[in-house]
Image: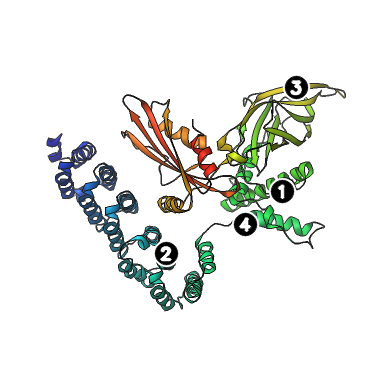
Amino acid sequence: MEPLLSDSNRNIATLALTTMLKTGHESNVERLVKQITSFMSDISDGFKMEVVRAVKGLALLYPGKYKTLMAFLSSNLREDGTADFKRDLVDALIMIIENIPAAREAGLLHLCEFIEDCEYPNLCTRILGFLGEEVASTSLPSKYIRFIYNRMILENALVRAAAVDALAKIAMKYPKLRQDVLLLLQFGANDNDDEVRDRISLYTSVLQQCLQESNEQAKIGYQALMSSELGFSLDALYDNLVGHMASDAKDAAFDFNCLPSDEAYAATAKAQAALAPEKKRPGLAPGPKASVAETQQKEAEQKTTASAELARVLSEIAGDELGPLQHSCKPKPLTESEAEYTVQMIKHQFKNHLVLEMYVGNTVQGMILENIQVRLTGLGQSWSEVGASAISKLEFGQASSAHVVLRKNGGDETAGVVTGRFGAALRFLVKEDGDDLGYEDDYPVEHVTITTGDFIAPKPIQAGQFKSVWEQLTAQGVEATQKLALNFKTLEAAVEYITTTLNMAACDNTGKVEMGVRGHTLLLSGNFLAGQMCLVKALVGMDPERGCVAKISVRAKNEAVCQVVSSALM
């Protein structure tokens, strides 16, 4: 393949070189990198990005060559290029820093030099966020402060705000720099942007408390301050406050404990919206496409209606027994889409209860269904039925929801997870047009299956932040590991299976497997019941003798959560 490196067609030469980068020996790395450096300026950004991806793979394969590879990446950062090309270069540098400890400090300096002359604000803010997480753990954090402070005084408001955040994070993680960072922040106290000025004021106040009091209370307040997460949904807060003020109990204190998390609220609204697609009236031409503002307003109205309706129904069935909603699962069809009566199921998770919402549609012309109830069989000792709601009437083309509330019997030793499988059927009164009496009928649907994944809500982590959160759980949490043999012929199928079964969000673009690789690292994040964060690192590979194998590592603050999630794929 080496003769192709001198081909007059630079595209062919580049493809040959990237292939050699992916398959070459460690002793050839310097020579290959030197060759490709000579004609990087003559190829398109698309081919440049292919080269960068090959270099990323090479860095993981031969970590001892990180200096050569990082020098190549940083030199290209100084050249002209599109935002996508520069983003790939930054991704490659961050990946090397995260995976090769010896490369950390040199890599951080390369990133610092890049932001000195970075024309892409979004890329600059991402690097500043990464620096804020990583700099405090270096041998000499103070040498990076100048680069970050320059961004606070020389860039636009978006970048200045990110620089303020980075400085504050470093100061709180590295107490020796708190006084110096406090002084730097005070220099920017009169910034002309409200957001930047407010952040500086806030962080200055916290740092002053930490310096003066040196107590744990100030540190706890800082941790809450730096977190972008609330324990509940703001939309749910608004909806519930409106309902509270309209109720007879408006003079009573509002209970924040009843508010669902942002994920639970959004999942419930999304699931409800997915069950009720807009139907086109026959004989009418499609109207003009709704504007973005109209679409957003409609989605907001659907969220409010769905959340309020679910809360009303469950209050009638179980009163205040359920507590706050933890999260809602995606709709699952229990019948074929062409069936006479269609049924889709949404599982709503509460701390000690599970609500099954059955969304029933009548597609039979001339038939009316009345008193539609859900009947479950084979609950066993794991579940008890608390109550249910019925659908009073469904005419042709109509759809509505019936609910069943189940209480867990046990689950204390498994972090609240109670799995199961039981039969389900609809019972209703069928009436034809003109028939006042009708007849009772039972309509079996697919079995209801409850898995470990139903107790987890996908929770994406900000790009580039997985490693820092993973390391935080090293000190504050526990870890469980499982080795598995999976019955799949491709890495793509195995990755999809793990992600779907655990019902977690793929982080740092690890949900997709690169072409031609024999191993892949899948990073997953989710919230267990009661908002307990859970992270998974799955190493998946194809072994010539054993087929598809995987090593699953789970970290969480609760040991039972780790054990349950790690064994969910067995």
Q: Which mark is residue 442?
A: 3
Which is closer to the viewer, label 3 or label 2? 2
Q: Earlier in the sequence, mark 2 or mark 4?
A: 2
Q: Quadrant of residue 411?
A: top right
- Left or right: 152 in relation to 358: left
Q: What amino acid is found at the position of numbered circle 3 in the picture?
A: Asp
Q: Earlier in the sequence, mark 1 or mark 3?
A: 1
Classify 10 Å Cα crowding around label 1: few (below 14), some (14-19), many (20 and above): some
Q: Position of residue 539 (x, y in %)?
A: 38, 38
Q: Can you say whether 335 is above or below 298 in the image?
A: above
From mark 1 to mark 2, how far is it between C-alphas?
43 Å
Would you say the residues marked 1 and 3 are in contact, meaning their CB atoms lie under 8 Å apart? no
Q: Earlier in the sequence, mark 4 or mark 3?
A: 4
Classify 10 Å Cα crowding around label 4: few (below 14), some (14-19), many (20 and above): some
Q: What amino acid is found at the position of numbered circle 1 in the picture?
A: Ala
Q: Which mark is residue 234?
A: 4
Q: What residue is disc 2 on? A: 173
Q: Secondary structure at mark 2?
A: helix
Nearer to us in this view, 57 or 276: 57
